[in-house]
Image (cartoon, rainbow, N blue to C red):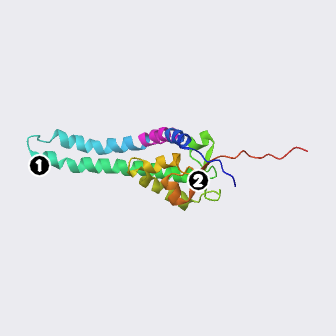
Amino acid sequence: MNPNYAGFWMRFLALIIDGILIGIVRAFLIVPILAAMGMGIVNDIQNMDANRPEDVIGMLGPLLAMASVVSLISTAIWVLYYTLMESSKFQATVGKLALGIVVTDANGGKLDFAKALIRNLCKIISGMVLFVGFIMAGFTEKKQGLHDIIAGTLVVKKQPELSPKPN
């Protein structure tokens, strides 16, 4: 196997395309949840006495709960989207498909769900310190980010399908 590895900028552009798509999905799922949760909080704020510190501090709990729910749902959408798409027959997200790149295991094979999940959970680690784990893809021999190295995966340009020669 002589793979043609997908470089940093190609992967970055795919990330932008996927980010737009995920952002749209998040909006449709999260806005109604925020609206439902926010109704009770708005009522509490209207009945709050701003001169009483305990009323103001009492609002922190519901606001933190709402932020936590949004964060949890957003992360779940993100991880599930990438994991399901990269372990599917397409081996790529919509952004990667648009650019003609796929995610494979170290031998060029299709990822199973568990390996794709590990790869995508490791992206959290890749982003922890100034996104250095992602930037690594621009400097490693096989164009792997930290999450790729941990999961044993590669991102490569899709090989053209060989069609049978007509008789």
Q: Badge 1: how crowded within 10 Å, few (<14), some, or many (20+)?
A: few
Give the residue number, with chain letter if any, for mark 1: 54
Q: Main secondary structure of the magenta part?
A: helix
Residue 47 image position (x, y, % from top left): 15, 41
Residue 120 placement, left or right of 101: left
Amino acid tagged 1: Glu
* Residue 19 inside the magenta-drawn segment: yes
In the image shown, does 97 or 143 lie closer to the viewer? 143
Residue drawn at (69%, 52%) of the image: 2
Q: Earlier in the sequence, mark 1 or mark 2?
A: 1
Q: Quadrant of the C terminus?
A: top right
Helix, strand or loop at disc 1? helix
In the image shown, does 35 or 101 lie closer to the viewer? 101
Residue drawn at (64%, 52%) of the image: 89
Q: Which mark is residue 144?
A: none
In the image shown, does 121 or 147 lie closer to the viewer? 147
Residue drawn at (42%, 53%) of the image: 124
Q: Badge 2: how crowded within 10 Å, few (<14), some, or many (20+)?
A: many
| C-alpha gap between disc 1 and disc 2 | 53 Å
Residue 32 placement, left or right of 147: left
Helix, strand or loop at disc 2? strand
* Magenta stretch in the rendered image: 17-27
Give the residue number, with chain letter if any, for mark 2: 154
